[in-house]
Image (cartoon, grey):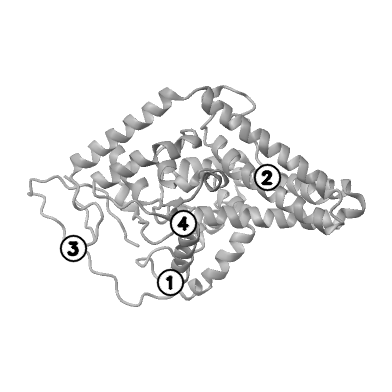
């Protein structure tokens, strides 16, 4: 039996290995039930969202033809901002997860969808679906955790460069789609290890460059030109809409993985990880946002980040439906279901960014000595680094 040293506040110390695997089986049963019940109601939902988003975008673009007039600029910019948020969050993100592949509709499929984003869909699917969801909140493996530029845990060695992380994070929030493209390329790692000269990496960079050119041409040349005398006003409106979309999506992601109460994990803690332990890591490494139905749609239902990380390929409209059942499992197994309003979660996440920019006020508690493996009670292999 493998025993890993754990901190005194280990949130799963009360669970046996059997408890964790039983929890995993219960979650598997929920997933299978939802998969078996997918049908026309779900298909109608995503088609309606796509139709609404497209009508809103076209309508906003038409209004922006007259953006020389302030009321038209305000209405058009607001509508375009909402349309871009919907396209990225509830539509693009979830289609690229394969949530709607079961419909077998070639127009709404993870292999054919290209979203309104500078990161090419295939690169995003690799970094997000294959890496982020596999290594959720594992320090050094999950690029979404701190976006590769921030200190995210007290046990990480502090360096004066981290003093600037509130500023780095703000800049990243403003230009979030470009930040995502950069770590989809694993830019820092490839530059550090000299892999930036390989044909494969250069091909990926060229793909990102082509996508950026298409996005810039569409947003800042074609649509403004169609506006004639409102050219610069339409350009400003599009820039504003992209900024709002970036700030919103960054905030949603921060709320899902960075508030107080969300755990981070050491690389060694996932060695030999079982299905049940993977589920527990998703449960402890994610947080929800409470709110109304409109908020849930505007976040791409990532307001149910816990449910999404447990079942990333289930239709997003089902997360709210299963959330009470998931929360009941948390309670029954003595785990903390981290949730809160969006202002509360955003404040909590940013407070952590500022706190971890500074050196620790006190030394982290020493780890508990290894547990004697002669004890009869099975010990789970999942180990947290703490938050």
* Residue 83, numbered label: 2
Q: Label 3 belongs to which residue?
A: 368
Residue under label 4: 341
Residue 235 in sight here: no
Q: Which mark is residue 289?
A: none
Contact (Cβ within 8 Å) of mark 4 with mark 1: no
Q: Earlier in the sequence, mark 2 or mark 3?
A: 2
Between circles 2 and 3, the one closer to the viewer is: 2
Q: Is residue 75 left or right of residue 288?
A: right
Where residue 198 appears, as percent x and y from the top left, is: 60, 47
In the drawing, what numbered circle is on residue 355?
Answer: 1
Mark 1 or mark 3: which comes first in sequence?
1
Viewer-side residue, 213 vs 19: 19
| Quadrant of the image containing the C terminus | bottom left
Mark in the foreground, 1 or 3: 1
Q: Alpha carbon of mark 2 to alpha carbon of mark 3: how far?
A: 51 Å
Residue drawn at x 19%, y 42% as measured from the top left: 17
The answer for how far apart the CA atoms under marks 1 and 3 are is: 25 Å
Label 1: state its secondary structure: helix
The crowding category of the residue bearing disc 1, from other C-alpha atoms within 10 Å (few below 14, some 14 to 19, many at least 20), is some
């Amino acid at each position: 039996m493998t025993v890993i040293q754990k901190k005194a506040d280990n949130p799963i110390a009360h669970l046996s290995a059997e408890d964790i695997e039983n929890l995993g089986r219960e979650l598997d049963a929920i997933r299978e039930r939802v998969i078996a019940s997918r049908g026309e109601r779900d298909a109608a939902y995503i088609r309606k969202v796509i139709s609404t988003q497209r009508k809103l975008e076209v309508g906003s673009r038409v209004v922006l033809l007259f953006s020389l007039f302030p009321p038209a600029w305000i209405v058009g910019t607001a509508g375009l901002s909402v349309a871009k948020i919907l396209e990225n969050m509830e539509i693009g993100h979830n289609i690229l997860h394969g949530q709607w592949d079961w419909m077998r509709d070639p127009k709404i499929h993870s292999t054919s969808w290209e979203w309104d984003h500078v990161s090419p869909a295939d690169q995003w699917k690799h970094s997000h679906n294959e890496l982020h969801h596999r290594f959720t909140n594992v320090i050094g493996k999950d690029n979404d955790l701190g976006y590769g530029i921030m200190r995210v845990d007290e046990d990480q060695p502090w360096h004066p460069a981290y003093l600037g992380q509130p500023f780095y994070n703000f800049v990243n929030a403003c230009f979030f789609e470009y930040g995502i493209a950069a770590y989809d390329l694993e830019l820092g790692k490839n530059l550090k290890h000299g892999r930036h000269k390989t044909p494969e990496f250069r091909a990926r960079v060229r793909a990102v460059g082509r996508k950026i050119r298409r996005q810039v041409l569409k947003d800042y040349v074609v649509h403004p030109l169609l506006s004639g005398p409102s050219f610069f006003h339409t350009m400003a409106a599009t820039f504003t809409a992209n900024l709002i979309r970036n700030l919103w999506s960054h905030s949603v992601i921060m709320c899902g993985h960075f508030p107080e109460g969300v755990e981070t994990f050491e690389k060694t803690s996932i060695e030999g990880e079982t299905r049940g332990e993977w589920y527990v890591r998703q449960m402890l490494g994610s947080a929800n946002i409470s709110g109304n139905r409109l908020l849930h749609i505007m976040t791409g239902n990532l307001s149910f980040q816990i449910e999404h990380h447990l079942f990333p390929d289930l239709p997003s409209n089902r997360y709210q439906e299963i959330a009470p059942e998931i929360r009941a499992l948390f309670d029954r197994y003595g785990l903390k279901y981290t949730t809160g309003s969006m202002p509360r979660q955003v404040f909590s996440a940013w407070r952590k960014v500022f706190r971890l920019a500074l050196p620790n006020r006190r030394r982290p508690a020493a780890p508990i000595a290894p547990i004697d493996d002669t004890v009869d009670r099975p010990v789970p292999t999942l180990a947290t680094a703490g938050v």
